Amino acid sequence: MKRDRITEQLNKNLSGKRFEHTLGVTYTAACLAMRYGADMDKARTAGLLHDCAKALSSKEKLNACRKLGIPISEVEEKNPELLHAKLGACFAKKDYGVDDPEILSAITWHTTGKPGMNLLDKILYIADYMEPNRDQAPNLPRVRELAFVDLDECLFLILKDTVTYLESRNISVDPITQETYEYYKSLRTGDLNE
Ligand code: DGI
Ligand code: FE
Ligand code: FE
């Protein structure tokens, strides 16, 4: 599907607020792609579709995953919101005709991140966190500056604040989020090799 059709479709499927966020992520991902020489088209399509499964209720997310054969972990069972990432990648392929494995990977990992993300994964993860409509997270000015200076350092800061936030609200941290945090923390100090 062409990007303009995808945009029309999403405008129908998502709430006004979610659609605005989606456009914010799309343009922020495009800016980061410019900065780091990533594929601009892939960054825009990934941004556009990253939350395409967000409108389903928790129950619908769980049911859709069961129907599509997407495995549900214990943490996902308790926090079905997490599933919108994997489900989003599945819908992107099935309903929007996206076949590119890099785009589908970036959508799959945009919520938890994963250790050793590739450039597009990182760009989408960071764009989702810092797009212009976001205003709740701490350290947003620093994150927005760092994103254009050092992607891995930026990821570390986002993951640190995310884990701190989840723990402060007694929300269970997904093991992949925790691993991702440890991974980008260890990259800074070189602990990974010790
Ligand atoms: O979909 P968005 O709201 O744009 O952003 P997102 O895909 O990063 O999802 C954000 C939500 O995901 C936020 O409420 C925190 C939650 N989240 C991120 N990592 C974890 C998590 N929730 C749990 N339970 N565990 C995690 O590790
Ligand atoms: Fe999301
Ligand atoms: Fe998002």
Image: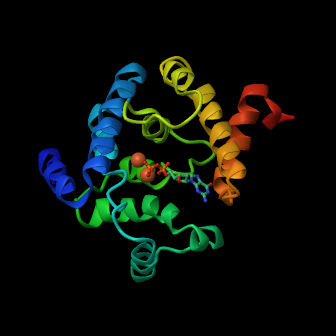
- Quadrant in the picture for residue 131: top left
Q: Position of residue 124 (x, y in %)?
A: 43, 40
For residue 172, above or below residue 117: below
Q: Is residue 6 left or right of residue 26?
A: left
Q: Is residue 163 left or right of residue 138?
A: right
Q: In the visual, does 122 lie left or right of 25?
A: right
Q: Is residue 160 above or below residue 36?
A: below
Residue at x-position 72% and y-position 31%: 187
At 39% from the left and 53% from the top, the residue drawn is 104
- In which quadrant will I find the N terminus? bottom left
Total labels drawn: 0
Camera-side residue: 166 or 96?
166
- The furthest residue to the right: 194
x then y, percent, for residue 11: 19, 52
Answer with the quarter of the image where residue 117 lies: top right
Q: Quadrant of residue 152?
A: top right
